[in-house]
Amino acid sequence: MNDNFPKIIASVLVEKDDKFLFVEEVLESGNQRWIVPGGHVEFGEKIEDAAIREIKEETGLDVEIKKFLGFKEAIFAKHGYHTVIFFFLAKPLTDEIVLSEEKVLDAKFFTKEELKDLDLVQSARWLVENHLAE
């Protein structure tokens, strides 16, 4: 089976007290960057359900999806990476962050101002500039 197809990713921007949750991960390139938490949509799974599952798996948070923000394609052929990322805005239903995935190094809430100087992946930078602009 040919595995050279784009992957569908569901990502959740969690907002609490005018701050937004980002996670620091080791990427396919080996670099560490801050990203919007999320992950692959499983076969037969609705994108919104995947978003809720992925945020729980990565951060331990239960969330309520508030709205769909948009999507962004990310292609890095030399790393074998091609995804279509669907971004959702959510509010947390629980407070305690528990990191359970090895690739997730840290998780923190940031203000819009703090995000300007954060080392974000391109898709996260796009989201901040296009959907969190003041």
Image: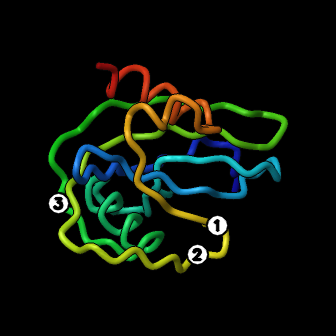
The image quadrant of residue 24 is bottom right
The numbered dot on residue 105 is: 1
Q: First in sequence: mark 3 or mark 2?
A: 3
- The residue at 77%/43% (across/down) is 80
**Cα distance, mark 3 to mark 2?**
21 Å
The percent coordinates of residue 90 (x first, y second) are: 23, 52
**Cα distance, mark 3 to mark 1?**
24 Å
- Which amino acid, mark 3? Glu
In the rendered image, the vertical position of residue 92 relative to residue 127, given as above or below: below
Q: Secondary structure at mark 3?
A: strand
- Which amino acid, mark 2? Glu
Left or right: 113 in relation to 105: left
Residue under circle 2? 101
Residue under circle 3? 64
Q: Are marks 3 and 1 in contact (CB under 8 Å)?
A: no
Q: Secondary structure at mark 2?
A: loop
The percent coordinates of residue 46 (x first, y second) are: 28, 57
Q: First in sequence: mark 3 or mark 1?
A: 3
The percent coordinates of residue 103 (x first, y second) are: 66, 67
- The residue at 81%/42% (across/down) is 79
- Pointer 2 local density, CA inside 10 Å: few below 14, some 14–19, many at least 20: few
